[in-house]
Image: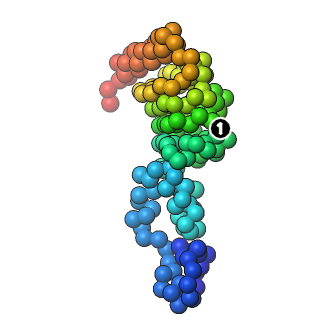
């Protein structure tokens, strides 16, 4: 019996029933992993060894990290780093919805490790400061081969008009640089 490789490790019942249920998960489960919300993805990694391995080894589910209820209440800088590290530096979308425990330092560490983020959504992240957000956006806009296309902020305490103007200037400068680069590239 392949209990180490089957998805019935956590089931209870008699041995005959377990033998009938034993086996690898249906292939469709592996195909839906990249489309699952973060909570469900983490739960799937606990179901059985094949799914745990698939979640651990596949980078695709980790390219777009969206943290929302109920995970946002417990999501800290350390957890964010652990989850973001699964993207191996190729994170595209980082959406932290009402993650009050995320700090400027945690956000900066994730951005340092994942310079290809093109969507940064941080509404309601009250642990962030305007200067921390500006620093993150500045870093993401410095890469000439990549562009921050979308930023969403609200609920950041002490955000003033000057901060918003600074963010806008970084985004517009980045957009202009991207257009110039596209014009300079030869057509293939």
Q: Is residue 95 visible?
A: yes
| Residue 138 x, y percent position in the rendering | 55, 19
| Residue 20 x, y percent position in the rendering | 48, 86
Among all residues in the image, which is located at the extreme bottom?
16
Residue at the spot of label 1: 77
| Quadrant of the image occupied by residue 176 | top left
| Looking at the image, residue 9 lies above or below residue 142 | below
Residue at 47% x, 71% y is 25
Count all numbered tags in the image, as a single digit. Answer: 1
| Residue 114 x, y percent position in the rendering | 57, 35
Q: Residues within 10 Å of mark 1 (few under 14, many from 20)?
A: many
Colouring scheme, one of rainbow, by chain, secondary structure, one colour: rainbow
Q: Is residue 135 visible?
A: no
Residue at 48% x, 81% y is 21
Q: Quadrant of the N terminus?
A: bottom right
Q: Quadrant of the C terminus?
A: top left
Residue at 60% x, 18% y is 131
Which structural element holds mark 1? helix
Among all residues in the image, which is located at the extreme top?
162
Q: Is residue 129 left or right of residue 93?
A: right
| Looking at the image, residue 2 lies above or below residue 167 | below
Residue at 59% x, 75% y is 9
Q: Nearer the viewer, residue 7 or 40?
A: 40
Q: Nearer the viewer, residue 79 or 145?
A: 79
């Amino acid at each position: 019996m392949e209990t180490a490789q089957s998805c019935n490790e956590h089931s209870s019942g008699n041995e005959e029933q377990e033998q009938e249920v034993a086996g690898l998960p249906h292939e469709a489960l592996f195909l839906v992993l990249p489309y699952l919300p973060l909570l469900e993805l983490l739960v799937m990694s606990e179901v059985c060894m094949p799914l745990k391995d698939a979640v651990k080894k596949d980078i695709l589910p980790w390219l777009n990290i969206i943290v929302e209820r109920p995970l946002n209440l417990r999501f800290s800088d350390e957890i964010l780093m652990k989850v973001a590290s699964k993207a191996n530096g190729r994170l595209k979308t980082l959406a932290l919805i009402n993650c009050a425990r995320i700090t400027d330092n945690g956000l900066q560490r994730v951005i340092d490790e994942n310079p290809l983020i093109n969507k940064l959504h941080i509404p309601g992240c009250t642990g962030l400061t305007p200067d921390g957000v500006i620093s993150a956006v500045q870093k993401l806009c410095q890469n000439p081969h990549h562009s921050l296309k979308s930023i969403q902020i609200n609920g950041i305490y002490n955000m003033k008009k000057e901060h918003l103007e600074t963010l806008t200037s970084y985004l517009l400068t980045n957009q202009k640089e991207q257009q110039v680069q596209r014009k300079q590239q030869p057509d293939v």
